C-alpha cells in the first residue's frame, strides 16, 4: 500500500490516504498518484524558488537604495580607525541624525564608502597623520599620495587614469550648475550598448550642490536607474557652488577665487548628497580642473582623492586604455556628448566581445595602486 503524509520505502508522499494493493495497480489510479506526487513536489519547489527570488530581489533593492538623512547635525571631519568583525575601515566623517551617531567610512583596500552607526565599531580616534601612516600601504593612501605629488599643476591635478586589466575606460560626467536639463542620451546609450555585457553599467558623476538642488526630477531619474540596477553610480564631490569668472585669471578663478569657503564647498555638498539619498565617494573633481598645490592639500586633508582626466572629449583629447574620460552631462556640452556617443558606436563589436568595457572608477584607481605593491 501507499502511505501518504509520511515516508515509505524512501519516498516522500502527501495527502493522508490509504489505497489498497488492488487500487494501487489500477492503471488510472497509479497515473493519478504519480501525477499528484510530481505536481505537488513541483509546486513546492516552484513556490520555494519564487519566494527566494522575491527575497533576493528585495535584498538587492534595499542594498542599492541609499538611506536619506534629513536631520543631519554636527557634520564634521573625523579621522580614526574602525573595525567591525575582521575588516579595518578608515573613519572620515562623523555626524548625528535622528538621535544616532553615524560614521562615513572608507575601505582603504577597495575605496568603497558607507554610512554606518558608530556603535557597531571598535574605534580608535586618530590624527590625519597617524591615520595615513597606519594605512600607508593601501591603495587608498597611495592614491592620495600620487594626487599630492601632482599638485603643482594649475590644471588637471590629481589622478588622470586608472589601470584596468582589459582595454576600456572609466566614464566621468560632470554635473555643473546649468539651466539646461540633464543630457539623458548619455545614460540611455550606454545602457543600450552595454546591457548584454555589463549590468549595471558603471559611471561616475561629479555633482555640484547647486545642480543637485535645482534639478530634482533629473536626479530622481538617475536614482531610479540605479535602483533598477541599470547603472551603478560613483558620486564625486564637485564642490557646492562651482563659481567661475569669464574674466579672472586661473590663479584667481573657480575654487581659487578669493574668499572661497572650502569647508562649505566640500562638506555642504556631502550633506546635501546624504539628504538626497546619494552616497559620497572618496573622490573630488576640481571645478574647471583648476587648483594649486595648497588647494590640493586642503582637499586631501578631507580624505578626498582629486580626480582629473586625460581625455576631455570636447577638447579633442582621445581616450587610451585606462583613460578617465570627461564629458559634461548637464546639457552645456553637446559636442562632448556627441563625441562620446560616436566613440560608443565605433566600439560596438569590441563591446560585444568584451574587449572594450566601462570600468568602475573606484576599481580602476584601486587596480592601479594595487599593482604598485
Image (spheres, helix red, strand yellow):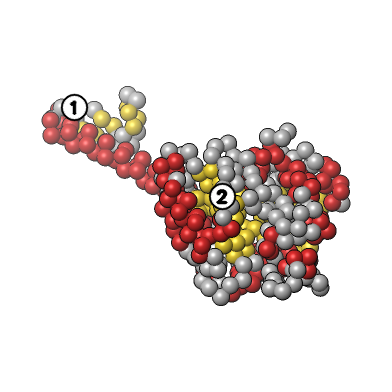
Q: Which mark is residue 318?
A: 2
Residue 55 visible in this rendered orientation of the protein: no
- Front in this rendered view, residue 5 or 132: 132
Q: Position of residue 107 (x, y in %)?
A: 70, 46
Badge 2 element: loop
Q: Tell me if residue 22 comes above or below residue 101 in the rendering.
A: above
Q: Which mark is residue 263?
A: none
Badge 1 element: helix
Q: Quadrant of residue 83?
A: top right
Quarter of the image for the C terminus: give it: top right
Q: How far apart in space, not on screen, are marks 1 and 2 (Cα)? A: 81 Å
Residue 181 visible in this rendered orientation of the protein: yes
Q: Residues within 10 Å of mark 1 (few under 14, many from 20)?
A: few
Report the residue marked by disc 1.
21
Q: Position of residue 62 (x, y in %)?
A: 54, 55
Indicate which disc, 1 or 2, sits on the residue closer to the N terminus. 1
Does 371 sit left or right of 301 as displayed? left
Does 235 sit left or right of 81 as displayed? left
Q: Residues within 10 Å of mark 2 (few under 14, many from 20)?
A: some
Residue at far top of view: 9
Quarter of the image for the N terminus: give it: top left
Q: Position of residue 228 (x, y in %)?
A: 47, 56
Q: Position of residue 12 (x, y in %)?
A: 34, 32
Q: Tell me if residue 367 comes above or below residue 237 in the rendering.
A: above
Amino acid at each position: 500500500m501507499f502511505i501518504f503524509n509520511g515516508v515509505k520505502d524512501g519516498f516522500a508522499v502527501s495527502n493522508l490516504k490509504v489505497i489498497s494493493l488492488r487500487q494501487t495497480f489500477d492503471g488510472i489510479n497509479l497515473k493519478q498518484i504519480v501525477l499528484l506526487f510530481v505536481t505537488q513536489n513541483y509546486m513546492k519547489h516552484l513556490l520555494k524558488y519564487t519566494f527566494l527570488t522575491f527575497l533576493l530581489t528585495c535584498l538587492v533593492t534595499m542594498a542599492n537604495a541609499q538611506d536619506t538623512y534629513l536631520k543631519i547635525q554636527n557634520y564634521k571631519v573625523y579621522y580614526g580607525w574602525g573595525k567591525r568583525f575582521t575588516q579595518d575601515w578608515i573613519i572620515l566623517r562623523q555626524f548625528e541624525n535622528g538621535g544616532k551617531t553615524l560614521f562615513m567610512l572608507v575601505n582603504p583596500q577597495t575605496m568603497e564608502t558607507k554610512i554606518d552607526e558608530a556603535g557597531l565599531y571598535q574605534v580608535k580616534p586618530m590624527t590625519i597623520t597617524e591615520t595615513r601612516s597606519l594605512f600607508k600601504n593601501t591603495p587608498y593612501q597611495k592614491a592620495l599620495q600620487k594626487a599630492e605629488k601632482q599638485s603643482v599643476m594649475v590644471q588637471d591635478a590629481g589622478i588622470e587614469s586608472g589601470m584596468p586589466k582589459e582595454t576600456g575606460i572609466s566614464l566621468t560626467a560632470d554635473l555643473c550648475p546649468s539651466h539646461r536639463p540633464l543630457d539623458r542620451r548619455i545614460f540611455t546609450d550606454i545602457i543600450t550598448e552595454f546591457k548584454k555585457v555589463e549590468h549595471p553599467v558603471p559611471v561616475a558623476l561629479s555633482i555640484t550642490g547647486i545642480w543637485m538642488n535645482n534639478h530634482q526630477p533629473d536626479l530622481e531619474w538617475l536614482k531610479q536607474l540605479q535602483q533598477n540596477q541599470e547603472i551603478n553610480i560613483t558620486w564625486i564631490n564637485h564642490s557646492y557652488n562651482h563659481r567661475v569668472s569669464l574674466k579672472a585669471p586661473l590663479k584667481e578663478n573657480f575654487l581659487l577665487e578669493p574668499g572661497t569657503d572650502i569647508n562649505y564647498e566640500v562638506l555642504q555638498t556631502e550633506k546635501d548628497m546624504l539628504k538626497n539619498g546619494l552616497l559620497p565617494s572618496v573622490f573630488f573633481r576640481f571645478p574647471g580642473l583648476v587648483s594649486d598645490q595648497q588647494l590640493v592639500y586642503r582637499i586631501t586633508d578631507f580624505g578626498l582623492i582629486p580626480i582629473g582626466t586625460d581625455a576631455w572629449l570636447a577638447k579633442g583629447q582621445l581616450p587610451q586604455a585606462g583613460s578617465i574620460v570627461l564629458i559634461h552631462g548637464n546639457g552645456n556640452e553637446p559636442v562632448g556628448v556627441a563625441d562620446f556617443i560616436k566613440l560608443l558606436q565605433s566600439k560596438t563589436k569590441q563591446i560585444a566581445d568584451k574587449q572594450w568595457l566601462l570600468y568602475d572608477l573606484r576599481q580602476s584607481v584601486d587596480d592601479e595602486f594595487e599593482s604598485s605593491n
